[in-house]
Image (cartoon, helix red, strand yellow):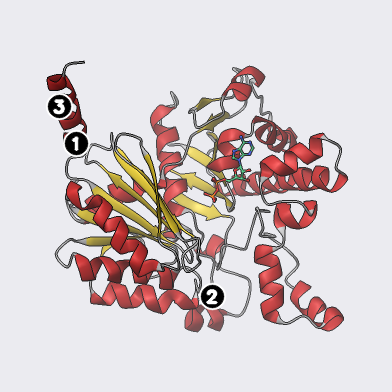
Amino acid sequence: MSPTNTFHDQNAETSTLTNPTLVLNCGSSSIKYALISEDESTRITGLAENLGLDTARIKHTTLNNEKLEIPISGGRHKLALQKILELLEQYHFVAVGHRVVHGGREYSEAVRVDEHVLSEVKRLKILAPLHNPAHALGIEAVQAIYPNVPQVVVFDTAFHQTMPPVAYRYPIPKALFDEHRIRRYGFHGTSHAYVSERASDITDTKGTHGWLTAHLGNGCSATAVYDGKSLDTSMGLTPLEGLMMGTRSGDVDPSLHMHLKRQLDMSLEDIDAMLNHESGLMGVSGLSNDLRTVEQAANEGHADAMLAVEMFCYRVGKYLAGLSCALPEFTGIVFTGGIGENSATTRNRILEVMRHFGIKVDAAKNAKLVGGNEGSIHAEDSSIELWVVPTDEECRIAQETRAALNLA
Ligand code: ADP
């Protein structure tokens, strides 16, 4: 290639990142980021992790797919964001979209950040104590460095605000709902919205679609989506309700807390930590929260690992069967998340649990759809469609950010 061509190629690459949106997902000890071009064809991604520890670092992938690692020993959110913004400054992003876990019942769509919105994100830490304060830090850090760049918050709960009361209320005294907002909110909203919309785009079935979307990653949730609207979902007031997850238990008897307090004198904080961090695949297998590790041990005959995998699939299948009640019509199931996108055996076992639904899997298609590929896995004579759709929460957040600012 001549030097002139190289020059042109580099220029072409830079120019494809036109009017990019910066998507930030500020967690309690990490920050994921993606800079996405207006036409969504190009992106730069990265992750700041181990924040606050000696091992804090930024892993950055450049436009040319080069991997950089930048140590920021002891650095917290503010320092990490300063460095991230320095790395991305040259691309002149036009807006910043933040993933925010909890929007309470106030927000049913993405909104532009102003003083009121920022104070609401902070106030809603009562419902998301680990997440919302970190999101607020992210918003303030960008405000301090780029006061004129518009920022938008995209709530994980917003997509589920279309749930009817029959799905979102708990059967507990009304005053707790009226006065204290105790209700089901649901999470992973951007993922369920993205994959259900994508399934509606790629199916040949005409008319209104009813999907069950199964987001199976470290966190797991399932949603019933009809005509693009969430009608019910497995997570509740907090992301602990519903499916068995990597380290979260999902549903347990609500009296478990009382029982453990009485029998073992455990504090509420200890029980909460146990259910969130020491349960799920990790708790049952005693090995790991990572399905790959648990599956491998199960294949080698580890009895607890075998039970963990079986319970995981049984609980997903049972939930999907239950959620089908929310759909006026049942077009199909959409699998996504690290497990849903990669583990053909898990998908198969989940569908076997739903054996009374007339579902037929095309084994060859199912085995092939791994590693982030999209496609159908149902046999011709299946009662419903089955799709694997890699999720793209960053892309959805960028789209909603542009829409909220009338840039789309
Ligand atoms: P997060 O919720 O943290 O974004 P991911 O969506 O990346 O998580 O999902 C992580 C889960 O996906 C882990 O349990 C991991 O074991 C599982 N996973 C990833 N790749 C595979 C694979 N090839 N086979 C089975 N499980 C996989």
Q: Residue at left 59%, top 17%?
A: 380
Q: Which mark is residue 7?
A: 3
Q: Crowding at label 2, few (<14), some or many (≥20) Cα neighbours within 10 Å? A: many
In the visual, does 360 lie left or right of 135? right
Q: Crowding at label 1, few (<14), some or many (≥20) Cα neighbours within 10 Å? A: some
- Count of numbered labels shown in the rendering: 3
Please state the quadrant of the image where ligand 1 appears. top right
Q: Earlier in the sequence, mark 3 or mark 1?
A: 3
Q: Position of residue 392 (x, y in %)?
A: 41, 42
The amino acid type, in three-letter code, at marker 2 is Ile
Q: Position of residue 120 (x, y in %)?
A: 35, 76
Q: Nearer the viewer, mark 2 or mark 3?
A: 3
User: Disc 1 designates what residue?
Assistant: 14
- Cα distance between the residues tagged 2 and 3: 59 Å
The secondary element bearing badge 2 is classed as loop
| Quadrant holding the N terminus | top left
Check the image and report above or below for 166 versus 3.
below
